[in-house]
Amino acid sequence: MKGGTVGQYIFDVFNAGGPIGICLATSFLYCFIFIVILSFFAEPLCWACVVIVQLGLLGAPILFGWKYYDLGLLANSTDPPLPKDELASIDSQRSLYLAIAIGAGCSAVCFAVCLMCFFS
């Protein structure tokens, strides 16, 4: 059985039982340690995630509003004027950026209201 390539492969897997067992035991130990550490720091980690989400929701309208404004400057300040199909493309992009900025702003306000109302 050891003579062929398939037999050698099976023999190698069979001989790897010890290291695989050690890896499984260490992974269970690491999981247990992680759960214990997480139980001590769960609340600060949750609040850190809430703060990061709120900052992202506040930053998105600023970013997309800036992109909306920047494309407006591009459309109005080119010399010679842009072709009509390019202006239409810019207008559709501006509309998309404005819609995303408004949606993200509303989401940020709703998230902040939920935090204020349900915080205990």
Image (tube, rainbow, N blue to C red):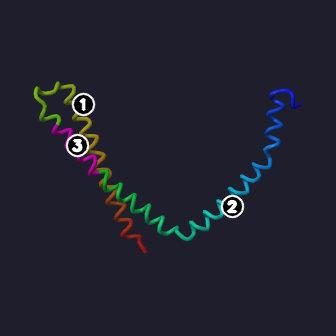
Residue lying farthest bottom? 120
Task: Tell me the kind of residue under disc 1.
Answer: Ser
Is 83 left or right of 22, judged from the image as shown? left
Count of all numbered marks drawn on residues in the image: 3
Count neighbours of disc 1 (C-alpha within 10 A) and say few if under 14, some if 14 to 19, many if 20 or more.
Answer: few
Task: Tell me the kind of residue under disc 3.
Answer: Tyr
Label 1 and label 3: CA atoms lie apart by 13 Å
Q: What element carries label 2?
A: helix
Q: Give the range drawn in magenta.
A: 61-73
Q: Mark 3 points at which residue?
A: 68
Mark 2 vs mark 3: in front: 2
Residue 28 on the magenta span: no
Q: Where is residue 100 in the image (x, y as percent from the top left)?
A: 31, 46
Answer with mark 2 or mark 1, whichever residue precedes in sequence: 2
Q: Name the residue under label 2.
A: 29
Q: Is residue 103 above or below residue 120?
A: above
Name the residue nearer the viewer: 23 or 81. Answer: 23
Who's the residue at 24% across and 43% down the image? Answer: 67
